[in-house]
Image (cartoon, grey):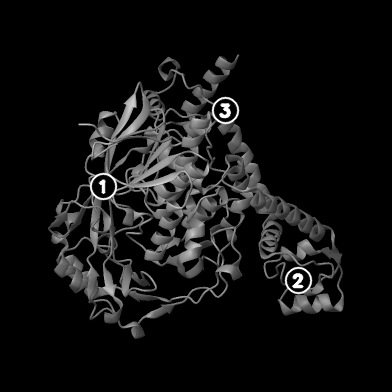
Amino acid sequence: MPYLEEHFDVAVIGAGHAGCEAALACARLGFETVCFTVSIESVALMPCNPNIGGSSKGHLVKEIDALGGEMGKNIDRTYIQSKMLNESKGPAVHSLRAQADKQAYTLSMRHIMENTDHLTLKQAEVTEILVEDGKVTGVKTFSGATYHVKAVVLCTGTYLRARCIYGDVSNDTGPNGLSAANHLTESLKNLGIEMLRFKTGTPARIDKRSIDFSVMEEQKGDEKIVPFSFTNKPEDIQREQISCWLTYTNERTHEIIRNNIDRSPMYSGVIEGTGPRYCPSVEDKIMKFPDKERHQVFIEPEGEYTNEMYVGGMSSSMPEDVQYEMYRSVKGLENAKIVRNAYAIEYDCIKATQLKPSLEFKNIEGLFSGGQFNGSSGYEEAAAQGLMAGINAVRKLQGKEPIVLERSDGYIGVLIDDLVTKETHEPYRMMTSRAEYRLLLRQDNADLRLTPIGYEVGLIEQERFDYLNWKKEAIEKETKRLESTYIGGKKEVQELLEQYGSTPLKTAVSLAELIRRPELSYEAIAPIDAEREELSYDVIEQVNINIKYDGYIKRQLHQVEQFKKLEAKKIPENIVYEEIHNLRKEAIQKLNAIRPISIGQAKRISGVSPSDISVLLIHLEQLRR
């Protein structure tokens, strides 16, 4: 019996946040792309939290946008509340977070996918990756159809052999009751790919009409909106925002959980997968932090036209009756009606150390991977990897070198380097503390750092690139003016300083020196700056930060120089570690497993000591001679 056969350049498996970015990147670069999903309704699905961004994740979204990705634009179109986190701290950790209208977010991204040239969206389950002589040649679907392609990007999310569990209820389904993908794992194992079993979870959704908001703390959005996308201005996306609400667990909640902990599949042994350490279930919080009297619970709207409310902070896999009891013990939720039960979900993923820094599998040419399938957690981490995997799949077909962002280039570089270099034993979550050069990798300067790379790749249009160059020049020009413009102790100057509680001037100082004072800023000194010109908010922001943190920035730039020297010391692909004298056995095993591309990457491998690095450096020097 004949089966359907089709030809494309690239196949993307999965249409979640990683799959959407991968498929859009490939198609926008002119390559015929087919993107498979188990359900068209699951395109850019948000099965867990109804928000984009947050601490460190906001950085990732800004970087995705700076490179030419879609996530930032999509959340700007569909947000219902926006907030800048950590504003009381320095700009390095400022992180934008927006509540999304889940349905609108999905529909908007689906609309973009369906109307992008060179992109075909296909509802089908891929069951096999076709490989000949170590090279990808196509994929097969459950129906028996064959799609001949030159590259494949795996973005399967949490769907591979997925199982949703609460109490003693176990359903072999993907998130939100959608079909699981049960056949691809076997094909991947047959190709020699090492699989892991991870777990994540989600809280209940509650009917808004059953919540008493009068006893909760209202959480409003910011008055001044900061867009995620550098293509948008604040005034372009301003809207009336919808509030979130804050309440807390209490001793009664904790007692209910403790009394029923033996019924939790996480503690009874029913769940096999490893869960995320930094996003624990409420059971985990209570059992691991017994001295804590209460935990925050955020009540967040799932959208503008639904009564479903997300109970943030109370992810659980407890039985249904216990869920009702524990949620109703929380202040304001005494009469809560559950629309969707909380559940844990187990799924297959890979050990990401099998990937090159380009996100291509080391042992299979043309097979790339991105998202939660790589052992990460979160929509933003997934989208960032999907974008890079899509870009590098295309560059492979173009015969070009892959784009590999270094740790000093962006949070995306940190994320991917951590995944492919360090062994991940639990779902990986991005955090600002993971970035060594976070003062340089701020979300506000993501365009200055990465848009030239997006332009080189072909995802940034000329007009946007021209604006970036103008912006760079404007920042440099204004910074130089402020450094070279001196002001003395005139009456109006002293009065302004007094107004801000700042020390009066005894001698003339530059305007830049005034801006460096903690209590002052570019905007604060405007009344005494006679030569000041009208500048856009994004230029002003950069000028203010660059001047205020000048000393710290210079120090980090010096650290980056040292880092880049080690990254520049490349390790030959064909190196035989067993032939290097004085290299320890553990180091040989780890170096063979990871196959680092540079001394810098080798240095970050767990189990490779400083003395091993010294031995390796001596060996490379001998080879060079």
As drawn, the residue found furthest toward the front would be 2
Helix, strand or loop at mark 3: loop
Dot 2 and dot 3 residues touching (CB under 8 Å): no
The image quarter containing residue 317 is bottom left
> Between marks 2 and 3, how big is the CA–CA gap?
47 Å
The residue that label 3 is drawn on is 569
Write the residue at 53% across / 28% down. 399
119 with respect to 448 (left or right): left
Residues 436 and 65: in front is 65
x, y percent for residue 314: 29, 66
37, above or below 46, in the image: above
> Between marks 2 and 1, how big is the CA–CA gap?
56 Å
- Residue 347's tag is 1
Q: Nearer the viewer, mark 2 or mark 1?
A: 1
As drawn, the residue found furthest toward the bottom would be 214
The residue that label 2 is drawn on is 525
Residues 234 and 283: in front is 234
Which amino acid type corresponds to the residue marked 2 in the rendered image?
Ile
